[in-house]
Image (cartoon, grey):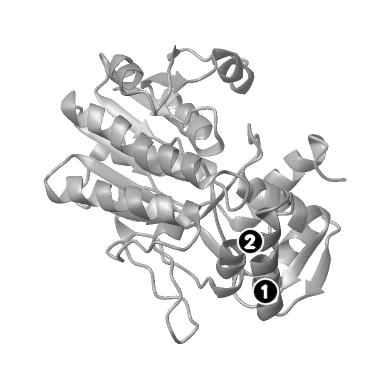
Amino acid sequence: MNVLVTGGTGLAGSHSIRELLDAGHTVRALVRSEAKLARVFPDAPKGLSSVVGDISDADSVRAALRGCDALLHAAAVVSMANASPESLISANVGGVKNVLGAALDAGVKHIVHVSTLSALFHVETTGRAAVITPDTEPHESEHAYGRSKAMAERWVREQQAAGAPIWTTYPSAVLAPDDPGMTESTNALRIFAGRFVPLTEGGFQMVDARDLATAHRLLLERSPSVKRHLVPGHYLPWRELHTSLRAAGARSLAMPLPGSLLRASGVVLDGVRKAVPVPFPITREAMLYATRWTAVDSSPELRELGLHYRPAADTLSATTAWLRASGHIR
């Protein structure tokens, strides 16, 4: 297949490009900067080409799709704190409609859209997180990121219900070595490995970007009848995450912190951000995820297609080693 990939200079997109190329497919990357693509792929792998454009520009998307028979839409703004609500909604809703809509108009038959488990996450009145399945209704949070992803998710489901050839993946926190842009998940691991792990309620669910890339390839190649797939990877209670990071050579501390304190801190810092920037990644939404998250099961269809998750310890060890070698942690 000739696959157009958006978000190819990001963590999930770059590993997905490698996976597709290794499987013998050709890839065209829709990028805003060819210089950045060259930095992410300094070896200029055979089969990879690029076109300059933007997911917010429908004309450039249509031009990029010419000659492609498959699409992986991995571009999104992932931010709990620093991006404006307008930019989040423009990228995560308008971008989805532009890219997937153009692919459907062009007759592309193999389309994979990368969503997120956070679009399905919500806390019930009991204070516990609701069970997440592929049929869980999208939930719009009060913050722009969760709201934008839920809005996009509803539009995609409308197209799927009408018979559109769109397959959706729902990853958890995505981690792997060689993160081109220090995503929110990688930055969180930098704090956990280099400073401290909060010992609190809930836990940390993560998927290796290389395993997610395999899921994307399998869905593009096999086009199974089931359209929505959970790709959560491994769930680690916070104490187990700390133990695993220590085993990987990290010297982080274990810091007992009540979930109520973390959630309250997120509310306070959200208010402060309205006046001044706050670089530390504590928001009410992020703290809800951190303290209320419960384990999500993987979609069995992906296992049947051949997806096998590498051990969590391998992902943590490799990513921590990369963070250390890159100077992000000591």
The percent coordinates of residue 150 (x first, y second) are 37, 55
Mark 2 vs 1, N-terminal side: 1
Looking at the picture, which amino acid does disc 2 mark?
Answer: Thr
Residue occupying the point 60% across, 57% down: 312
Sort mark 1 into few (<14), some (14-19) or many (20+) by Cα contacts within 10 Å.
some
Q: Point out the residue furthest to the left here.
A: 162
Residue 249 can be seen, yes or no: no
Q: Nearer the viewer, residue 162 or 214?
A: 162
In three-dimensional space, the C-alpha distance between marks 2 and 1, rounded to whole angstroms, equals 9 Å
Looking at the picture, which amino acid does disc 1 mark?
Answer: Ala
Q: Nearer the viewer, residue 253 or 122?
A: 122
The percent coordinates of residue 245 (x first, y second) are 75, 59
Helix, strand or loop for disc 2: loop
The percent coordinates of residue 24 (x first, y second) are 38, 22
Residue under label 1, please give it: 264
Quadrant of res 235: bottom right
The percent coordinates of residue 286 (x first, y second) are 59, 62
Residue occupying the point 70% across, 62% down: 269
Q: Are marks 2 and 1 in contact (CB under 8 Å)?
A: no
Residue under label 2, please give it: 283
Q: Is residue 264 left or right of residue 118?
A: right
Residue occupying the point 41% across, 66% down: 297
Residue occupying the point 25% across, 14% down: 67
